[in-house]
């Protein structure tokens, strides 16, 4: 029996992309997994994939920006799975827009999902996590500490989430709760394909800047998440594991520069 059997994991944004891949990976190890998002259909698809592979999955619709909905979703998770061992704050929104054209509402809505949503989930998961000496994993991005023209809203939100990772690790360590982050590099998903990789030539340029010579796969992130949340990482807290093929070592990412310049009328 694996160390995950009898445990439960809540993945926000678990109906697509990296969230779905992480949910499937935890479920494959024997954890009961609850996927959370606003749209029911993709969540049910994630559950069907988990069940088809022999796992236990549940779906809960919830907007992480709304504290009452979050409270109810966490109660649902604890009820269905009996407990809550791991919270993965993965839900996010993003789009490319030059900062001088970005509306205050556009900025606010991304910060609301990523940062306020991450806090809402962590806050209401706390009592459950404390009971089992659980884990929080926050999904950030390398531009939280580097730079990425055209996504100031997301960069600011992810930087906040990274700060929250370290602060909560320091504050909740006394309860045995570990808090870490993963910063993925570029990976094709529903969200990135629709909103970020708008220029086809972008991918080749990106790959040239990645020492390991390829863009990522959702499974790259899922494996890192599984390790960071598992017993093997029992003495790891407050850290951010970058999973990007070494891309960040170039000192600046600029994944979306072509798209940004085109959008801004400079391309
Ligand atoms: P994605 O496919 O767009 O997934 C985002 C998920 O968040 C969706 O399932 C979405 O579902 C959910 N979501 C959005 N707003 C929400 C809200 N208000 N309440 C609850 N759920 C909400 O994107 P992804 O590429 O898998 O990204 C996953 C995470 O990795 C994100 O945190 C992203 O910033 C990070 N990341 C990704 C990459 C990459 O290249 N893929 C790189 C660096 C970091 P609904 O719309 O149904 O709510």
Image (cartoon, helix red, strand yellow):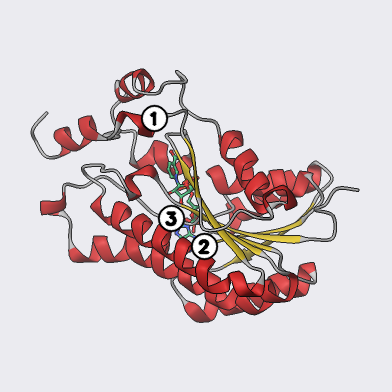
User: How far separated are the C-alphas under marks 2 and 1?
Assistant: 32 Å
Q: Which mark is residue 45?
A: none
Tell me where residue 87 sits by quadrant.
Answer: bottom right
According to the image, label 2 marks what residue? 38
* Number of other residues with Cα within 10 Å of mark 3, as a class: few under 14, some 14 to 19, many 20 or more: many
* Number of other residues with Cα within 10 Å of mark 1, as a class: few under 14, some 14 to 19, many 20 or more: many
In the picture, measured across the screen, residue 265 lies left or right of residue 256, that is left
- 236 to 205, vertically: above or below: below
The residue furthest right is 1
- 188 to 52, vertically: above or below: above
Mark 1 or 3: in front is 1
In the picture, measured across the screen, residue 83 lies left or right of residue 173, that is right
User: How far separated are the C-alphas under marks 1 and 3?
Assistant: 21 Å
- Kindly state the secondary structure of the residue where label 3 is placed: loop
Q: Earlier in the sequence, mark 2 or mark 1?
A: 2
Q: Earlier in the sequence, mark 1 or mark 3?
A: 3
Q: Position of residue 234 (x, y in %)?
A: 69, 55
Q: Position of residue 206 (x, y in %)?
A: 34, 24
* Number of other residues with Cα within 10 Å of mark 2, as a class: few under 14, some 14 to 19, many 20 or more: some
* Residue name at image x 36 percent, y 67 percent: 112
Residue 172: tell me if it is visible.
Answer: yes
According to the image, label 1 marks what residue? 247
Q: Position of residue 266 (x, y in %)?
A: 8, 32
Mark 3 or 2: in front is 3
- Kindly state the secondary structure of the residue where label 1 is placed: helix
Answer whether labels 2 and 1 touch (C-beta < 8 Å): no
- Kindly state the secondary structure of the residue where label 2 is placed: loop
Q: Confirm if mark 2 falls within 8 A of ligand 1.
A: yes
Q: Position of residue 13 (x, y in %)?
A: 54, 55
């Amino acid at each position: 029996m694996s160390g995950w059997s009898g445990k439960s994991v809540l993945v926000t944004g678990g109906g697509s992309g990296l969230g779905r891949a992480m949910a499937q990976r935890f479920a494959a190890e024997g954890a009961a997994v609850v996927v959370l998002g606003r749209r029911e259909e993709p969540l049910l698809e994630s559950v069907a994939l988990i069940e088809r592979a022999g796992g236990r999955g549940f779906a809960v619709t919830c907007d992480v920006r709304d504290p009452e909905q979050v409270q109810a979703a966490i109660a649902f998770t604890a009820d269905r799975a009996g407990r809550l061992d791991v919270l993965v704050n993965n839900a996010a929104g993003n789009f490319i827009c030059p900062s001088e054209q970005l509306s205050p509402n556009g900025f606010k809505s991304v910060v609301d999902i990523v940062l306020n949503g991450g806090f809402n989930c962590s806050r209401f998961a706390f009592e459950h996590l404390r009971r089992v000496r659980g884990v929080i994993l926050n999904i950030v991005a390398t531009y939280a500490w580097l730079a990425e023209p055209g996504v100031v809203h997301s960069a600011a939100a992810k930087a906040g989430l990274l700060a929250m990772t370290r602060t909560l690790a320091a504050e909740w360590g006394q309860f045995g709760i570990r808090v870490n982050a993963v910063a993925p590099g570029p990976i094709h998903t529903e969200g990135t394909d629709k909103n970020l990789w708008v220029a086809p030539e972008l991918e080749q340029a990106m790959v040239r800047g990645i020492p390991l010579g390829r863009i990522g796969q959702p499974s790259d992130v899922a494996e890192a998440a599984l390790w960071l949340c598992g017993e093997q990482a029992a003495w790891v807290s407050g850290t951010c594991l970058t999973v990007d093929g070494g891309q960040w070592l170039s000192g600046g990412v600029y994944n979306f520069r072509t798209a940004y310049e085109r959008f801004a009328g400079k391309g």
